[in-house]
Image (spheres, rainbow, N blue to C red):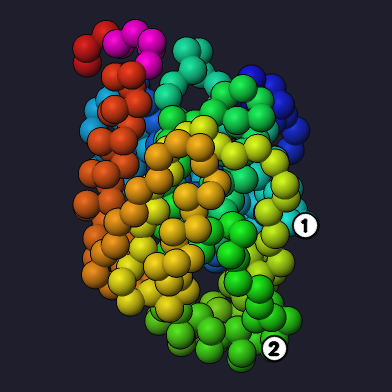
Amino acid sequence: MFTDSMAQGSRSGAFRRLAPRQYARARVLLFPHGGGSASYYRTWAASAPWDIEFLSVQYPGREDRYSEPVPADIQGLAAELAADLPADGQPLPTVLFGHSMGAVVAYEFARRLSAAGEPPAGLVVSGHPAPSLTRPGRVHLGDDEELIQELRRTEATHREILDNASLIQAFLPIIRGDYRLSETYRPLPGDRLSAPVTVLYGDRDPEIHQWEAEGWSEVTGGACEFRTFDGGHFYLEEHREPVVELLTAYARTASEASAVPWPSAP
């Protein structure tokens, strides 16, 4: 089992309880998009019901982990995150959610949990082609202006940051590093997941086509479902509530199917 003792040292750890749920019976782990941070999911965590806890992942190299080095590849990042997974008494059914780059980080994280005999209850991925169909790219090799133009195209960064020269310069190394992770990612051979997978994406998202979404069915021996939303790559901005409801229902189903005893009522 991955335990907190594996995360000792100078690092602050990867998981943020932005809205603790003392009586949680299941949890949802939220993996941010490239350039994103744990705080992106603050409102999601606050919206969670009393019995489901949403934990947000803080990648190294940003916010309170700014001074920590970013691993060389997605697999290394997933390994580091898995070592930080909180183990608070009774293991809880765990659902994973990742958007964009976070989708493949969550997938590789799921592979590590499964290899350790602790598979997640489910994997929900958003806005990213199936691992084997990941699009290569060279954005991370371009100059700063090319990178900024890419951010404008994908609407991945708020305009007030993009239009603030000093602020965007502080963010660019993080964003460039995440593009490197995404554009050089290639899944390694291994067993398929047993957990069910749900694929979400915007119907006008240029970063993923239907056939690329359908490729996710190859990563699991379990069920694979698909749901589209009105919007582009960041359809989440307009559809946060139904996505949170979907994740909550997923976690509730997992908790009902598990042997975890119901906690004392609050």
Q: Name the residue under label 1.
A: 72
User: Over which residues does the magenta segment extend?
Assistant: 258-263
Q: How many discs appear?
A: 2
Query: Magenta-highlighted stretch: main secondary structure?
Result: loop
Q: Is residue 33 visible?
A: no
The residue lying at 40 percent from left, 68 percent from top is 210
Measured in 3D between alpha carbons, the distance from the residue under mark 2 to the one under mark 1, in whole angstroms, is: 20 Å
Residue 155 at x, y percent in the picture: 41, 78
Q: Where is residue 236 in the image (x, y as percent from the top left)?
A: 32, 62
Q: Is residue 158 above or below residue 21?
A: below
Q: Which residue is drawn at 53% across and 89% down?
A: 149
Under mark 2, the amino acid is Asp
Label 2: element kind: loop
Magenta segment: does it hold 261? yes
| In the image: residue 142, left or right of residue 232 | right
Q: In this view, does 148 lie to the left or right of 30?
A: right
Q: What element carries label 1?
A: loop
User: Residue at 71% across / 67% down in the picture?
Assistant: 184
Residue designated by label 2 = 143
Locate residue 165, reporting x and y percent: 55, 86
Name the kind of residue labelled 1 in the image.
Ala
**Rendered image quadrant of residue 99:** bottom left
Which residue does the image show at 43% across and 71% down from the upper left? 209
Q: Is disc 2 surrounded by few (<14), some (14 to 19) or many (20+) residues within 10 Å?
A: few
Quadrant (top left/top right/bottom left/bottom right) for the N terminus: top right
